[in-house]
């Protein structure tokens, strides 16, 4: 074929690849039928047996660890030789210097084998609950934790704050009034109404609240009540300084109770959705109360709390405010493991105690420490 008298070979050049057409013997037979399945198989092929992937990974990790250990040993030996050479003097030539040690070859890999074997659980201590000789009334049982000394402390601090706020104030409260105020707060937590005014309103009036205290006096006490001296607030690292005496008093009452031999350590959320707490309000999605204040607690198997730690964001400040000093060995543990050791150090049980915790708190270092 030519174009204006010029051949195509002149424009494009000759084709370097030579094509060859193969005509099948029988055009009616498909090409797939000409090849047998067995033609792809090599009779001399022997598959290479490999160990499981997990086993090979363990071997590689072991190889790396042994190689690193040998390199560290060689590096330390070289440093010692250099120091010794320096002490003997700088006058020696390079010919007298000892040759550097070469890294040793990697040790032969040890096979990692896993055995499927059930671990026998040790016998756990049993608890024989003894019935009390005297059954206390609800008021007496409540006073075991919310003591009369605590009521006196709240009364004194509330009057002190009112005086610090306004020297000429006529506000004054008594221990009896503080007790009624606490009782109203507890009752409102059980019988909840949409608004605070509903407890004194004509249509929704609650006599258990309205007959004890007026709405105006209740609001005045709620604005004035205090638990600690604000003049000592400066310079403290405790972010729960204002409620620390209340928390400490109740916590000490919990520790005085007889303990069971099976206890657990976990997080506890105190529900709070307000904005006044700042970043003290935590968000834990795995808890029923997802938003609020976070506490670390040690409790019995039936849910009775023996000890609590208020979380403040930094674990060092949290444990320091709790009042339990850490030993040097405890400081080497993780933050959550330190919480377990602090809560376990205050146990007053005389018998063997089994302490349970999930993987958030557990570590091999904690197991060795306990």
Image (cartoon, grey):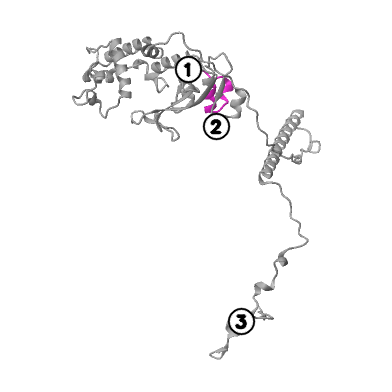
Which mark lies nearer to you, 1 or 2? Answer: 2
Q: What segment is highlighted magenta in the picture? A: 325-341
Closer-to-camera residue (117/369): 117
Is residue 101 found inside the magenta-colored segment of the image? Answer: no
Is residue 331 found inside the magenta-colored segment of the image? Answer: yes
Closer-to-camera residue (136/335): 136
Task: Tell me which numbered mark, 3 or 2, is placed earlier along the sequence.
Answer: 3
Q: Can you give x and y, in whole percent of width and height, for residue 13 in the image?
A: 61, 81
Query: Which of the image's four quarters has the N terminus?
Result: bottom right
Of all residues, the one furthest to the left in this rendering is 202
Residue at 66% x, 32% y is 118
Of all residues, the one furthest to the right in this rendering is 96
Q: Can you give x and y, in whole percent of width and height, for residue 305 in the image?
A: 46, 20
Of all residues, the one furthest to the top in this rendering is 133
Task: Tell me which numbered mark, 1 or 3, is placed earlier along the sequence.
Answer: 3
Which mark lies nearer to you, 3 or 2? Answer: 2
Element carrying mark 2: loop
Task: Tell me which numbered mark, 1 or 2, is placed earlier along the sequence.
Answer: 1
Asked which quadrant contains residue 245, the reply is: top left
User: Mark 3 highlights which residue?
Assistant: 13
For marks 1 and 3, give the CA distance.
Answer: 93 Å
Marks 2 and 3: in contact by CB < 8 Å? no
User: Mark 2 highlights which residue?
Assistant: 359
Q: Going by the image, does 46 lie left or right of 31?
A: right
Q: Going by the image, does 143 lie left or right of 80?
A: left
Marks 3 and 1: in contact by CB < 8 Å? no
User: Mark 1 highlights which residue?
Assistant: 323
Q: Going by the image, does 213 lie left or right of 296?
A: left
């Amino acid at each position: 074929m030519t174009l204006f008298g010029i051949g195509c070979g002149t424009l494009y050049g000759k084709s370097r690849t030579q094509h060859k057409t193969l005509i099948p013997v029988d055009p009616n037979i498909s090409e797939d039928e000409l090849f047998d399945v067995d033609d792809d198989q090599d009779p001399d092929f022997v598959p290479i047996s490999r160990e499981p992937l997990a086993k090979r990974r363990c071997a590689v990790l072991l190889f790396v660890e042994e190689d690193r250990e040998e390199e560290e040993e060689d590096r330390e030996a070289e440093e010692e030789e250099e120091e010794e050479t320096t002490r003997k003097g700088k006058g020696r030539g390079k010919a007298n210097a000892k040759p550097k040690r070469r890294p040793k070859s990697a040790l032969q890999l040890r096979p990692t084998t896993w055995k499927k074997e059930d671990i026998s659980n040790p016998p756990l201590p049993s608890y024989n609950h003894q019935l009390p000789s005297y059954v206390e009334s609800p008021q007496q049982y409540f006073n075991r934790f919310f003591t009369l000394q605590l009521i006196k402390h709240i009364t004194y601090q509330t009057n002190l704050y009112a005086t610090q706020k306004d020297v000429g104030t006529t506000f004054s409260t008594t221990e009896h009034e503080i007790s009624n105020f606490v009782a109203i707060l507890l009752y409102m937590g059980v019988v909840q109404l949409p608004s605070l005014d509903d407890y004194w309103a004509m249509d929704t009036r609650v006599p258990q609240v309205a007959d004890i205290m007026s709405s105006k006096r209740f609001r005045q006490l709620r604005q004035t009540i205090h638990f600690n001296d604000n003049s000592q607030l400066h310079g403290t690292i405790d972010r729960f300084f204002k409620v620390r005496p209340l928390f400490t008093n109740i916590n000490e009452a919990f520790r005085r109770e007889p303990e069971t031999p099976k206890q657990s350590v976990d997080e506890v959320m105190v529900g709070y959705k307000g904005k006044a707490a700042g970043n003290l309000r935590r968000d834990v999605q795995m808890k029923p109360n997802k938003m609020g204040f976070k506490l670390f607690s040690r409790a019995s198997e039936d849910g009775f709390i023996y000890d609590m730690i208020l979380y403040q964001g930094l674990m060092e400040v949290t444990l320091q405010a709790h009042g339990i000093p850490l030993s040097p060995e405890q400081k080497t543990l993780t933050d959550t493991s330190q919480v377990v050791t602090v809560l376990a150090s205050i146990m007053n049980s005389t018998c063997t105690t089994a302490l349970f915790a999930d993987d958030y708190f557990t570590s091999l270092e904690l197991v060795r420490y306990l």
